[in-house]
Amino acid sequence: MQTRNASPDLRLADIKEDGRLRLHFSGIVQGVGFRPFLYRAAEKFGLKGFVKNTSAGVTLEVEGGRLSEFVRHIVRHAPPLSRIETLRFETIPVRHATKFNILASNPHGQKNVLVSPDIALCRNCQKEMADPGDRRHAYPFTNCTDCGPRFTIIEDLPYDRPQTTMKGFKMCPDCRREYQSPSDRRYHAQPVSCPHCGPKLKLLVKGRERKGDALALALKILRADKVLAVKGVGGFHLACRAASAAAMARLRHLKQRSGKPFALMADLAMIRQHCLISQKEKELLTSPAAPIVLLAARPGNKLVARIAPGQNRLGFMLPYSPLHRLLIEKMGEPLVMTSANRRDEPIIFRDADTELPGLSNAILSHDRSIHTFADDSVVCSFDKEIYFFRRSRGFVPLPIRLPFSSPETVLALGAMLKTTFTLIYGNLALVSQHIGDTETATALAAEKQAVSHFLTLFARRPSLIAVDSHPAYPNRLLAADFPHCEIVEVQHHRAHIASLLAESGETGKVLGIALDGSGYGDDGTVWGGEFFLGNLRGLKRVGHLLPQFLPGGDAAAREPWRMALSLLLALPGAEKTAGRFADKFGLKGEQVLESIVQRRGGVMTSSCGRLFDGVAALLGMGDRNSYEGELPSLLQAEAEKARPQKKPYPFAIENKAGIFILNMLPAVAAMLQDKRGRAEKARCFHLTLASGLLDMALNCTCVSGIQKAALSGGVFQNTLLLKMSRDLLKKNGFQVLHHTQVPANDGGISLGQAALAAAKYHKEL
Ligand code: ZN
Ligand code: ZN
Ligand code: FE
């Protein structure tokens, strides 16, 4: 996944075998065992010279013959976590060196190095932890050049210990020996430490440190069904026993989170007891990024009702840090591991945070600080490929390669929910960690801090700032920090489509289908079911869902009963059915009335997310979303209970002044008449929407003959709809693009904003 090496364009024939060869590597070549690898390779070939880290990557000079063979060897066998982006070489006069040396880093010069993401505990380190004779037996902070924290502990480049949060720990003689020995696995592993010289665990209750074995005390807290805050790699988790109803109730109360699913941590054997795991899913779980993977729960599984009510999947991750491994091993059962945060805010990562004690019964912490935060990533396997819901720890800050080189340095600030930001320079796009919902001052401050960390690490100054065209999104305020930059406004759904084009390397024209919650439209109404033709140079709106009234504006996203009423009121014979529906939900007459009034002068929306909200409420999945997209995700789980179907409900497509409009009201009417069970109806609704998308695609492309469709937007987190739509489009001759590198939801928005802003100034696209 992240081990792909660019195949550098090498002309080996140009190498003079009797000369001295100077090679410059760029990419992820620091902190991943690259220099010791080159050292060992040079030894193997009997070459003399030196290697050193620079601010631009790694420089190597060698002489002594068999040079082209040597170069071929290093390109082919580079360390698994490294990623060579470029490799330049030149021949210089021989210096008759007698040794091969590893030289100290030069801290100056233009920075052009990529930073490694945080890497899950490797097999070798696991083995040592399990070995009672090893000096790192059961050591909660073990790591080596193949694993350990990186992005979250690096303050600046080049990546050397004094520039990390390990700078305060003085290596003991044993650790220093390992650190200095090129043949050792820990050679130049910057966070290297051991029980003598490294960080120490501590346990705090009510702000006071408890005496004794912190780990043993922490286990006691967990076994007593209490909630333990645990300092991990990119922040604090709240942990408790997943199997305990009392612990779960306590956690839901502390986090004020009624129905939202929690992530779980367990080893593979434990996960297998609860979920079915495909080969690809196993690969994702055990990958160096160790994300949370959404897995199909075994039928009748008892955890689901408590952990993820109404869902058919559970999100599991492996214990990716040595401390996590100790906790899971000693507990012998799955733990809930949810980010410690206030609702919709970024993960807490500082010990001094004043909210932490209120969220937990005790805190298991330590004295290695976290420089920047990173939540766990959330993925699933779709079509044997990775599909992101959240791209964060383990992936950030790996670059996404663009299909063009940007003449400008662009900083895109993202949207409002699930915010990320993106930095583009040259042909690289660096998408930030998950920030959260930037409606609060804390989240905004977190984005500001993370932006400044990125700009320091990569030593860039933006010349363009891209923002959402919504005039009231709070993170626009951050643009004020860059007074000399041009501001480029990007419409939300164009950004969704552009994010997919950028990550797919697509420069040709496509039909973009953005099915989404809501975003600010060109006409000031709320968009969210949009069809565009074009490419990164411009996307023209050619179709949309039939706009519906949005009773209560933003409140409708939290209270799907409003959209249900809106849909009912749009059907013939509306008032009666609407009244019955209102009774069923115990809504007061005024509320219905209010909706009707709103209907006559209210906001309109073409949002597909709101359509899902309304349909889910009409099918009795609930009347409120306790978290974003709750009812639509329950509707997907419901639909997945039913068998595949062939015949969709009716729908209509109109053409108004050259714009195609998909009207799903006939489907809603037919669904209300349908006598089948709820699962069948939910499935049929999915099929109808997919069929509607196909007909829209055929209509929208009939003049241009474009045969490529790009599917993005938050609604495409629904993998059932994604699969149905993709299959139908493919069957009818379309090539279909879907996300594999950033989420379809607003976590991908900043990449699309940045790509569109950059492309605006690119002449050849
Ligand atoms: Zn390791
Ligand atoms: Zn030590
Ligand atoms: Fe969106």
Image (tube, rainbow, N blue to C red):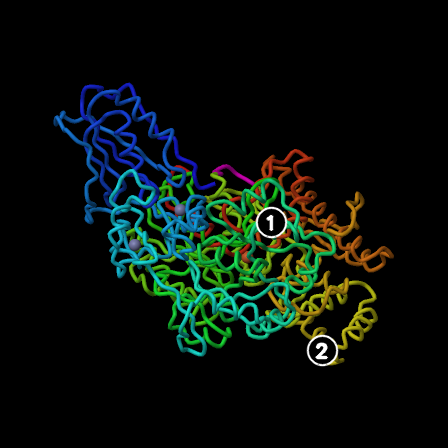
At which x and y percent is residue 628?
60, 64
Q: Circle 1 sits on which residue?
A: 269
Most distant residue in the front direction: 133
Residue 433 appears in the rendering: yes
Relative side of 484 to 558, left or right: left
Q: Residues within 10 Å of mark 1 (few under 14, many from 20)?
A: few
Q: Secondary structure at mark 1?
A: helix
Question: Does dot 2 land on a helix, a strand or a loop?
Answer: helix
The span picked out in magenta is 506-510
**Disc number placed over residue 591 in the picture, else none:** 2
The residue that appears at 50% across and 73% down in the rendered structure is: 360
Q: Whole-percent x and y of residue 294?
A: 60, 52
Quadrant of ligand 2 in image: bottom left
| Nearer-the-camera pick, 474 or 537 | 474
The reply to whether residue 760 is visible in this rendering is no
Snapshot quadrant of residue 70: top left
